[in-house]
Image (cartoon, grey):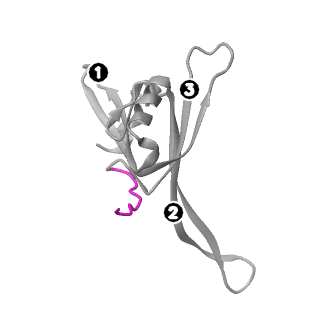
Amino acid sequence: MAISEFRNSDQFAFKDIELKVDGVKQVTVQSITYGTSIDKAYTYGEGDQPRSIQKANQSHQGEFTLLQTDFETLTAKGILNGYFDINVTYTIKTSDGAEQRLVKDIIHQAQVMDINKGMNQGDYNSTHTFTFIALGVTYDKRGYVSPVVSS
């Protein structure tokens, strides 16, 4: 399917996201962000203008926020002590109601760096944010694939 076919179609909404951490579906996901950074620097030569841009190391990081029940499930599984994969699937239903999985990103071999628990006066739910780093991210089969370091 060509990218231009998506221009006038429905865009993804938060309701279209399914998050699985270490194979377990997270039904109380409140947010997810992730990305890849590539170190880049100018290469200089004669004169004071850059001649090219060089790429160096990559890093992969993100965070997701869950409610109390999913937080307890993950901590009971020992997720804080090892590597785990995160699957993020974006799904839009077609006009006839059938599911059409359009994008599936995989965050490879993530490890938790920080956990932040929080609640404010008037909140109905306790939220828990996991900050992570990872060894790679596969951005759908049609998109960019970052290198993955094998374990």
Foreground: 32 or 122?
A: 122
The amino acid marked with disc number 3 is Thr
Residue at x 24%, y 23% (from the top left corner)? 98
Q: Nearer the viewer, residue 107 or 13?
A: 107
Whole-Å distance between the Cαs marked 1 and 3? 35 Å
For discs 2 and 1, the disc positioned in front in the rendered view: 2
Q: Are marks 2 and 1 in contact (CB under 8 Å)?
A: no
Q: Earlier in the sequence, mark 2 or mark 3?
A: 2
Instruction: Tell me the magenta residue range.
Output: 142-151
Check disc 2 and give the amino acid type: Gln
Q: Nearer the viewer, mark 2 or mark 3?
A: 3
**Mark 3 lies on residue:** 127
Q: Position of residue 8 (x, y in %)?
A: 41, 31
The disc label shown at residue 58, or none: 2
- Secondary structure type for disc 1: loop
Q: Amino acid at mark 1?
A: Ser
